[in-house]
Amino acid sequence: CNCNPAGVLETFAGCGNAPEGELCECKERVTGRICDKCRPLFWNLQKGNPLGCEDCGCSTAGTVGGIATCDDKTGQCFCKKDVFSRRCNECKDGTYNLQEDNIFGCIGCNCNKGGSVDNVCDKNTGKCRCRPRVTGQRCDQPLKLHYFPTLYQLQYEAEDGRTPQNTAVRFGYDEEVYPGYSWRGYAVFSEIQKEIINDVYIEKPSLYRMIISYHNPGSNTVLGKIKITPDDPSDSEQEVDVHFRPTSGPKLMTVVIVPGDFPVPLVMNPGRWSISIMNNQNLFLILPLNVDLLFHEDSLLVSDVFHDLLSSLSPFWISWQLQESVLSFQNK
């Protein structure tokens, strides 16, 4: 009769002695014509197990549809998307708080990418693993007696700059020309003001990328030049051409040598630097130019990190900022 010895009762005396209509006498948790399969909710058929198979032990909070069945060979239960382990009783990394009424099983940790070591949190409490001097459930709060420098920590307004003759910058403050301008207004380029200089101080030596937010409502591209000059003669002066294309609204632009090139890395060492923005054209157009951010060039500064830093004001990779340097190109 070929009964499976692992699945039949110890008292089984052979096929000839089986009850009428049966071939083999199976253990309590075993089924099949020859007692070779575990019943539903059980797995791991073993000869030494008096019941034949083990309980699946699935956590119904973590299984799809709340079912408690498992693979009868491996014992693997059928887990929800964010749940794992054989019994489906653990949240995957990046999630926590296993709940039966959650179709995914667990909640996302949502750790702050700037303030946390990674996106792994405590599987029960959801507490993220924070960087030094950072605290909070999501690692989005500074420790007591500490603070997060905001994206405006080092802010430079073009109208607060100077001309090459060290005179005050000419600026306008017309809301119709540039709605929502910051501080006192926006600097004005004309035949009598073709260059504006802002003095800045760099604390950390590194490569930098300058990103400019601007708006050119005209129909022609405006050509300008940015010159970065160090006070220290051992450092090198750097100069790049910029192309301010027409836009339908404010737009971010990374400073490049010519259109289509990769962003130019700016080498800046600690010390005082002068950033000069120049335009030699006389145009009948208004070009609000917002010199927005100068980033520390780092492989960790990816798009999702940048978004999280903006939302949380936790600038761990931003070294300094030129904010709201607004320029207007027009005829005298």
Image (cartoon, grey):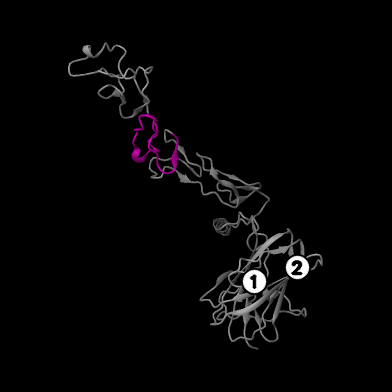
Residue 329 within the magenta-colored segment of the rendering: no
The answer for how far apart the CA atoms under marks 2 and 1 are is 20 Å
Front residue of 204 and 14: 14
- Sequence-first tag of 2 and 1: 1
Residue at far front of view:
2
Residue at far left of view:
20
Disc 2 on helix, strand or loop? strand
The crowding category of the residue bearing disc 1, from other C-alpha atoms within 10 Å (few below 14, some 14 to 19, many at least 20), is some
Residue at far right of view:
233
Q: Quadrant of the C terminus?
A: bottom right
Tell me if 270 is positioned left or right of 97 in this view.
right
Q: Position of residue 185 (x, y in %)?
A: 63, 77
> What are the residue bounds of the magenta stretch?
56-85
Q: Quadrant of the N terminus?
A: top left
Tell me if 300 is positioned left or right of 206 in this view.
left
Give above or below for 209 relative to 282: above
Q: Quadrant of residue 256?
A: bottom right
Looking at numbered disc 2 in the image, what kind of residue is underneath it? Trp
Front residue of 80 and 239: 239
Residue in view at x 65 percent, y 84 percent: 281
Looking at numbered disc 1 in the image, what kind of residue is underneath it? Ile
Q: Which residue is labeled 2 in the image?
A: 273
Taken as a whole, is the magenta stretch helix, strand or loop?
loop
Give above or below for 127 relative to 214: above
Q: Which residue is labeled 1 in the image?
A: 257
Give the number of the mark in front: 2 or 1.
Answer: 1
Front residue of 173 and 275: 275
Q: Position of residue 19 (x, y in %)?
A: 20, 15
